[in-house]
Amino acid sequence: MKNQWRIIVTILLVIVVAVFAILNVESVPVSFGFTTVHWPLILLLLVSILIGAVLVILFSTITTFQHNRAYKELEKSSQQRIKALDDDNQRLQKRLKNSGKQTVGQQDKQIQDLEAQVKDLQAKLAAK
């Protein structure tokens, strides 16, 4: 639907330009600074429209190129940041697993120490 409207608007603009050009066929002087020429107004209008279209295409292409480059740089920095965060996450998970093992090992040692103390106390009580 969007493209259909573009086609309709383009056809209307072409018709308006054609009617305007037919109404303005007389010669007009055009000064280039170093010389003056007499061109038909229709030719002058068409050349002006063509130059305007070329400039619009040029500027839009440059803008699109700049946006694409900025997008690629942003994507690259985002990927690097994601990789760094993944690495940090993995490192922290390993650290958490290791600290859990250390805690269990410390608890087992404390249990063994307490059991040893209980046996010592039982031995002392049995000796009395």
Image: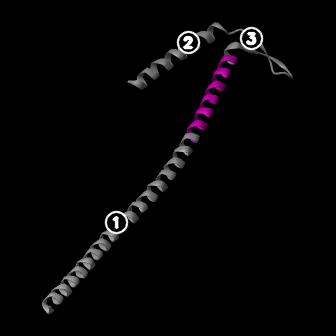
> What's the colour scheme?
one colour
Is 69 situated above or below 51? below
Compute the Cα span from label 1 to label 3.
Answer: 87 Å
Closer to the camera in the image, 97 or 18: 97
Horizontal placement of 83 versus 103: left or right? right
Q: Rounded to the nearest whole Å, what is the CA distance between mark 1 and mark 2?
A: 74 Å
The amino acid sitting under disc 1 is Leu
Prevailing secondary structure of the magenta residues: helix
Q: Position of residue 74 (x, y in %)?
A: 52, 47
Q: Which residue is mark 2?
A: 16
Mark sitting on residue 37: none
- Amino acid at pointer 3: Ser
Q: Which residue is mark 3?
A: 27
Q: How many numbered tags mark residues here?
A: 3
Can residue 59 be found in the magenta stretch?
yes
Q: Quadrant of the C terminus?
A: bottom left
SS at circle 2: helix
Dot 1: what SS? helix
Give me the residue at 48% from left, 51% from top: 78
Mark 1 vs 3, N-terminal side? 3
Q: Answer with the quarter of the image where residue 30 lies.
A: top right
